[in-house]
Amino acid sequence: MSGAVSRTTSFVAFSFASTLMGVCLVPLSVQSAFAQSDMTPVLVAPLVATPLKDGSGLSIPPSVQIGGPVRLLPRRLTPQRSQEEGSLDAGSGVRPEADVVEMGESTLATPTVILGPPVGADRFKLLAAPPGGEGSGIQVGVLGRVDEASVGLFSEQDGGLGATMWLGTDRALVEEGLSDLAVPLEGRSLQDLTRRFLLSTATAPGGVTQGRSLLALRLEKLNAAGLSDQVRRLVRQAGLKRIAPETSVQIARAFLANGDKVDACRFLSALPAGGDVVGDRVAAFTMKMTAYCQMIGGDGVAANLTLDLAREKGLDAPLFFALMAKAIDGITLPAQMPEKLTVFDLVLFDEARQAVPEDVVERVELTGLPALARNRGHALDIRLAAGEQAAGYNLISAPELADLYLDASQAGQGDSASFTRARAYAELMSEAVPQKRARLVSAMVGSVPHGVVHRAVVDVVQSALATAPPSRAVLADAPQIIRILIEQGDRTRSGMWLNMVRETGAAAPGLLQLELMHLILTLPDNGLIVPERASQLLLDATVAGGPDRDFAAVCAVLFDPLGIALDGAVWPAIFDTGELADGVMPRNDVMQRLAAAGNQGKRGEAVLWSLLALGERPLAEVHPQAVAAVATALRQVGLRDEAKAMVLDVMLAKTSTVGS
């Protein structure tokens, strides 16, 4: 009974604090988690029978019992990774680190809170006075504002789009475009351009704002593209002092995705307390993070109180409540698995020591894939499937996927397509004869449909194919091998294999399409080539008919914006042999803004509208005229290499399957 009375009293005190302050979460978010004096995590024993997962054996340091203010969040604490599973231990392995983000004396235009010592019943007595009043134990200060929009990782010398990329651009237009941007885009060239676009250091556009933080929009898209590691790097390097609430949400998500749960909790002080958890995503995230940070700080009582308040306010998150109950009290609650899982959900599965669902790779957001692939606590089939997806989006390296393949091949289990590819990879890597290795590469890549996993497999076999010279002994596999080399961007080796096929005089299927793609791969930096070669290839393709003729009709449209002048006989030949290339045009307003941005030399806008134009649907479905318009705009703002790479990705998407 005493435990029930204590918990009831706690909830009353917590609710009373909410009424007094109008900010129910920030003062209690991690009030007993960390002591400023010695920077050691302070864990208050929860009123539950089951011990907490992390650091339940720690006691309250004497320095805290004596007195002195306890900061809401620590300044220089990061969790230490477990050497065995790559997991994080916030309890015993906390260490100082110099490059963590400190928001300093001001973070945003909301109160910042420093709490008094939460010892025994006194931690509820301090709520009896108004915030900032005598005896309240709470210091309140109004913080300033700053435009965060200019920060980035890349200067123009580092691959960024330049400090003046937004010169002459209206800010409201950028906010609208960023909100509509769908990521990730198809094709490595567009994914790379998106990353550079979102991480460029540039003067913010001027004009009236719609109220959105540009930095928050950029970080939101980076997280959606799976680039949470870049968000973390940006935050660490930028030294942000004043952060908008929606920006803090994205930063916290990125830190969670990278396993930095203590650093994620630092940004609670930049999140506004209160709010409608039903209709306000920031308020809902703040409520969840508050309970989570209380839990990992060792205060199960406060975490349970926050969960009670969240239910009372109508937060609809059954999986969150179930996983938190399991992590804090060991209680199992029923919860239906949502269609989509977030990185936060993955973190809670780990805290609750619960197995993720078997179809987690299909459910989880993109930024959660690297963590799934790297966590040895998950089943190997889940890690393997997540690794292939992550590598396909360039979120983990090809060597990481190679290691996963070798681990899976040695495990001797699993009959999924991923395990089959793992065994095939192990076989080709152990093959010493170059010609046999080339055949194995062709077979492995050819068994994967074009898409994300195909791109991952193309990358992972690069080292195996690099030591296999052209050979007539593998002539039947040559078209597939040439295409793989073109996808890898290897113009020299793809040219060697093409020459070998030409010398044999063999009628290799898809050879004309490969020749046309290789032509783009070898396009000089000035964008000009001898037109006779391009024109002759197109004329040969129209005569060949079928897929070759249709591909030639696409290429004829795409070559002009790259500076490839065609012979006057090309277009009549295309008209005489069939219809013009077709496809879906992007929105009219996007195409109009794209053309205007290119004509006016507005680099930031040209890239934004290019990404919007090509991100609405698969590249194979986009009208060639739209692709040509994007290439034209990119060249007009000085991005010739980017235009060439984009056109090649579109050609790879539109070409018929080689060898079929």
Image (tube, rainbow, N blue to C red):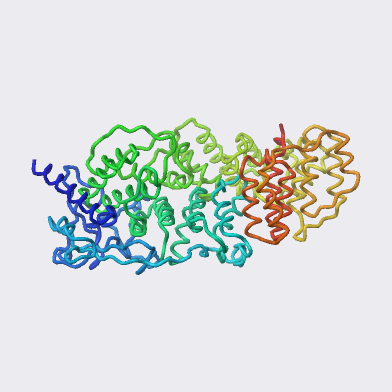
Give residue 515's position: percent from left, percent from top: 78, 45
Question: Vertical placement of 110 versus 396: above or below?
Answer: below
Hey, which quadrant is residue 206 in on the image?
bottom right
Hey, which quadrant is residue 335 in on the image?
top left
Q: Can you see residue 197?
A: yes
Question: Vertical placement of 72 versus 398: above or below?
Answer: below
- Relative to 169, 562 lies left or right: right
- Relative to 376, 400 lies left or right: right
Give residue 355's position: percent from left, percent from top: 35, 37
Hey, which quadrant is residue 144 in on the image?
bottom left
Give residue 80's position: percent from left, percent from top: 33, 57
**Residue reaching furthest to the top:** 415
At 45% from the left edge and 66% from the top edge, which residue is drawn?
Answer: 146
At 43% from the left edge and 44% from the top edge, which residue is drawn?
Answer: 372
Q: Nearer the viewer, residue 613 or 276?
A: 276
Q: Nearer the viewer, residue 422 or 615?
A: 615
**Quadrant into which the C terminus falls:** top right
Give residue 381's position: percent from left, percent from top: 45, 36
**Quadrant into which the N terminus falls:** top left
